[in-house]
């Protein structure tokens, strides 16, 4: 970029933002465009209150390269490159060249197997945009977050969120379908110790198309999205529960039948799923969903969460249970709001 076209940096080129992770009720699995992270199907999720990533971005003229510190540790290599790619998009939009220091912390244990990429890239997009002096809309922030991690698009808006697959970078973004207070649901995350290293979702998405079941999963996605969206709007737990479990099982069927095959469930994951199905048969409102890992997210009405968490702790192989209710949008920290 020619110097003459560069903008002056804002007077305080730093900002701090935080964002919740989210749990997908209808899953995103597979991209039609890997580089732009345009998904093959839409998805619906709930933000997880109380769990968050907090990220400070400061653009500094003296820095020769971007720097990334996560939970007190320097990150280099592919982790840094993924963050720099988002910073490059922001630098391009703001017409600045300064490199940035990015300091990020998660308040949830990294060993708990909750993907931090959703909250991390949502917080990064918001903090970096603000630090660069841009006024970005929620839609623009969701699109930017999507470029770092698809599910991060859904951690930008509040509460219950839908990400329409879209057809291009411009129209693939997430929006809120209901605020967090719309429905008092909770996610009780049954942490299950995994014995082998899992394949990350970025590699997993690239394998989805190798499964002969993926086409059927994608073809049926609009139907599941309709059922899930309506169940949320009407607060119909039974309808939500069957759509959520079906969608999780369909994604894992695709994972297990891709080449190479991805098997994320552990014996304890299966034990939790079976128990939850049995509880529901006995009239206890709870349903399960599993991401690209062994932990089982048990979704239930908030008033049942304490009892369900206690029962989950009693299942052999469950090492911990974290509980979260529906969370708000990605936010700038107070001191930056008036800038
Ligand atoms: O955003 P990614 O690339 O980490 O993919 C997320 C994939 C799942 O968590 C398995 C499903 C989802 O929609 O969150």
Image (cartoon, rainbow, N blue to C red):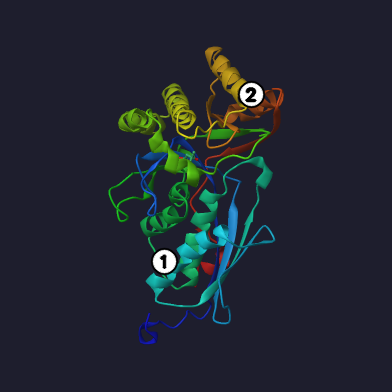
* Quadrant in the picture for residue 35: bottom left
The residue that appears at 45% across and 38% down in the rendered structure is 182
Please report the residue visible at 39 percent of the width from the left and 39 percent of the height from the top.
43
Query: Residue 20, position in %: x, y?
Result: 54, 49
- For the residue pair 29 and 115, the one nearer the viewer reads as 29
Q: Secondary structure at mark 2?
A: helix
User: With respect to residue 291, does 150 lie above or below?
Assistant: below
Q: Is residue 302 above or below residue 78?
A: above
Q: Position of residue 200 (x, y in %)?
A: 54, 44
The residue furthest top is 282
Taking 4 as reference, is 261 left or right? right
Label located before the other in sequence (1 or 2): 1
Looking at the rendered structure, which numbered label has been put on residue 173? none
CA distance for labels 1 and 2: 43 Å
| Outermost residue toward the bottom in this view | 4
| Res. 178 visible in picture | no
Crowding at dot 1, Cα within 10 Å, few <14 / some 14-19 / many 20+, comes out as some
Task: Kindly check if marks 1 and 2 are in contact, taking CB atoms under 8 A apart as contact.
Answer: no
Quickly name the residue at label 1. 89
Residue found at x 39% / y 50%: 34
From the top left corner, tell me how far across and down residue 217 is, in percent: 36, 30
């Amino acid at each position: 970029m020619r110097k003459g076209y560069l903008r002056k940096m804002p007077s305080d080129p730093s900002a701090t933002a935080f964002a919740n992770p989210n749990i997908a009720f209808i899953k995103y699995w597979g991209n039609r465009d890997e580089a732009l992270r345009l998904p093959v199907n839409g998805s619906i999720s709930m933000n997880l209150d109380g769990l968050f990533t907090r990220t400070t971005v400061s653009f500094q003229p003296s820095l020769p390269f971007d720097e990334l510190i996560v939970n007190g540790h320097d990150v280099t290599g592919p982790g840094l490159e993924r963050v720099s790619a988002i910073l490059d998009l922001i630098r391009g939009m703001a017409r600045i060249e300064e490199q940035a220091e990015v300091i990020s912390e998660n308040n949830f244990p990294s060993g708990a197997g909750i993907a931090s990429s959703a909250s991390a890239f949502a917080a990064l997009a918001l903090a970096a945009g603000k630090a660069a002096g841009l006024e970005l809309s929620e839609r623009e922030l969701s699109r930017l977050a999507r470029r770092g991690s698809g599910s991060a698009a859904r951690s930008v808006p509040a509460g219950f969120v839908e990400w329409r697959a879209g057809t291009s970078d411009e129209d693939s973004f997430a929006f809120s379908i209901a605020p967090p207070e719309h429905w008092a649901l909770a996610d009780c995350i049954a942490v299950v110790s995994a014995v082998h290293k899992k394949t990350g979702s970025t590699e997993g998405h690239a394998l989805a198309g190798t499964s002969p079941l993926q086409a059927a999963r994608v073809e049926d996605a609009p139907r599941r999205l309709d059922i899930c969206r309506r169940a949320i709007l009407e607060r119909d737990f039974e309808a939500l529960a069957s759509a959520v479990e079906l969608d999780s099982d369909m994604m894992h069927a695709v994972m297990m039948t891709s080449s190479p095959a991805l098997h994320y469930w552990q014996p304890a994951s299966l034990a939790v799923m079976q128990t939850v199905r049995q509880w529901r048969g006995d009239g206890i409102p709870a349903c399960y969903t599993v991401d690209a890992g062994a932990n089982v997210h048990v979704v239930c009405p908030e008033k049942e969460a304490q009892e369900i968490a206690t029962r989950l702790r009693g299942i052999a192989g469950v090492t911990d249970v974290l509980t979260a209710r529906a969370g708000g949008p990605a936010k700038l920290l107070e001191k930056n709001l008036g800038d």
